[in-house]
Image: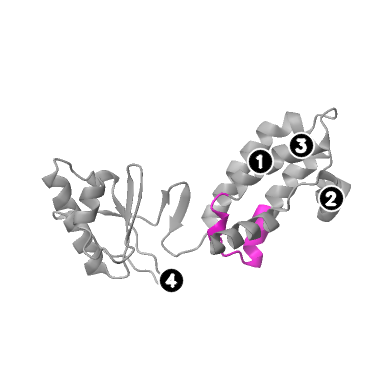
């Protein structure tokens, strides 16, 4: 596969594709260049006895404007998607990450629900609960957090999800009207926004 992608790349000095296992993503700021790359890849695949599955191939135009760009393989139009998932992350055509964070919160809530019997168990030390939260719940919630451009509005979603889980660990609810900072201090878990910030700092410096 490496031989095929190298031969198909119209500009090897430019980062214009991502490969992971059997997933491949091509990208370009220019429509014609991307179509040329698709054509090259298709020809190389056929030369090696392989075919691109058109039904499973999608195109997306990421733009602030309502723009749709047509791509094809041998005249067969590719599906224009408004969003699609790549390596567990959701990419949207408007470039926003609201949907991505929403899905991360849903997955983290599912983890929190599964951990609930342990988090609510009074005989389990709070330090053990914190380790469970940090190692399982928090990593699920902040997956791909390195790339999140968090606005104040977007910060509310992961924080709400975080606090729902932390309250289980201390057997409290919102009706108890205990401040988030107090709950976090009682649990000793890493605050979700701090965890995301640490992820981004490490990513920028790696």
The numbered mark, 4 or 3, whose residue comes first in the sequence reads 4
- Pick the residue in front: 74 or 130: 130
Query: In the shown orientation, is residue 164 left or right of residue 92?
Result: right
Query: What label does residue 185 carry, if any?
Result: 2
The residues tagged by marks 2 and 3 sit, at their Cα atoms, a distance apart of: 13 Å
Side of 56 relative to 166 (left or right): left
Disc 4/disc 2 C-alpha distance (Å): 41 Å
* Magenta stretch, residue numbers: 143-158
Q: Quadrant of residue 205?
A: bottom right
**Residue at disc 2, secondary structure:** helix
Which marked residue is nearer to the observer: mark 4 or mark 1?
Answer: 1
Residue 151, by quadrant, is: bottom right
Q: Earlier in the sequence, mark 4 or mark 1?
A: 4
Q: Tell me the colour scheme of the image.
A: one colour
Dots 1, 2 in contact, CB < 8 A: no
Q: Which residue is mark 1?
A: 135
- On residue 129, the disc is 3
Q: Is residue 110 left or right of residue 97?
A: right
Residue visible at 88% across and 46% down in the picture: 176
Residue at the spot of label 4: 64
Badge 1, how many Cα within 10 Å: few under 14, some, many 20+? few
Percent x, y of residue 155: 66, 60
């Amino acid at each position: 596969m490496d031989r095929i992608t190298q031969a198909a790349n119209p500009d090897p000095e430019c980062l214009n594709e991502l490969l992971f296992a059997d997933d491949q993503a091509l990208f370009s700021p220019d429509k014609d260049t991307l179509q040329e790359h698709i054509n090259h890849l298709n020809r190389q695949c056929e030369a090696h006895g392989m075919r691109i599955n058109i039904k499973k191939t999608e195109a997306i135009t990421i733009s602030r404007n309502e723009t749709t760009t047509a791509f094809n393989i041998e005249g067969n139009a590719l599906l224009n998607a408004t969003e699609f998932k790549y390596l567990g992350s959701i990419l949207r055509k408007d470039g926003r990450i609201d949907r991505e964070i929403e899905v991360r919160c849903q997955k983290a809530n599912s983890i929190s629900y599964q951990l609930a019997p342990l988090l609510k168990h009074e005989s389990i030390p709070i330090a053990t609960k914190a380790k469970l939260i940090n190692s399982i719940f928090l990593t699920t919630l902040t997956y791909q957090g390195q790339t999140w451009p968090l606005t104040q509005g977007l910060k509310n979603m992961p924080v709400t999800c975080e606090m729902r889980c932390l309250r289980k660990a201390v057997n409290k609810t919102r009706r108890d009207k205990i401040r988030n900072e107090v709950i976090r201090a009682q649990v000793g878990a890493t605050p979700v926004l701090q965890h995301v910030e640490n992820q981004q700092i490490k990513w920028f410096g790696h």
